[in-house]
Amino acid sequence: MKSTYALFAASLLALVAACDQGVAQTTKAPTQAEEIEEFCNQVASDFVASGGQSTGLFMGRIQQKMLEEEWDPETVSNTCSEALRRKTEFIQQHAQAIERRAQ
């Protein structure tokens, strides 16, 4: 009887340990704000990398995603505008550094 109880207790402890590891290894789902930020960063990167040649495509991607996900237009607009500003500033800073090195 004691061996059955010990086996049951050991199995229960192993199960609890496995559940604890499963919780620690899971990743949390991104919040809507994080999803918007990630999307805007990607779209802004693509836009800046294209040299700003595809304004219609840029705006179309934003509008389509906003409708698909039912995101607040003002939040998306603010987040994407900020991402675009950061990406543009980044490119300008690096372009200036390259120009200085070339001189």
Image: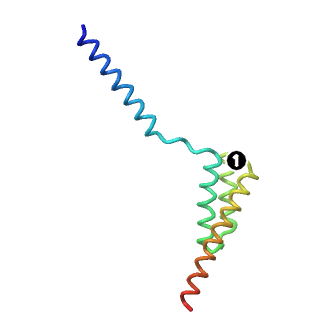
Report x, y in % for residue 41: 61, 60
Left or right: residue 20 compared with residue 96:
left
Which residue is labeled 1 in the image?
71
Taking the spot 61% from the left edge, 49% from the top edge, the residue there is: 34
| Residue type, mark 1 in image | Trp
Left or right: residue 55 compared with residue 30:
right
Taking the spot 62% from the left edge, 70% from the top edge, the residue there is: 48
SS for tag 1? loop
Taking the spot 66% from the left edge, 62% from the top edge, the residue there is: 83
Vertical position of residue 13 compared to residue 56: above or below: above
Q: Nearer the viewer, residue 70 or 28?
A: 28
Report x, y in % for residue 79: 69, 57
Left or right: residue 59 compared with residue 50:
right
Extreme residue in the right direction: 74
Q: Nearer the viewer, residue 102 or 66?
A: 102
Vertical position of residue 18 compared to residue 37: above or below: above
Q: How is the image coloured?
A: rainbow
Vertical position of residue 50 compared to residue 12: above or below: below
Q: Image quadrant of residue 58?
A: bottom right
Please identify the quadrant where the C terminus is shown.
bottom right
Q: Nearer the viewer, residue 89 or 60?
A: 89
Taking the spot 68% from the left edge, 67% from the top edge, the residue there is: 85
Left or right: residue 81 compared with residue 21:
right
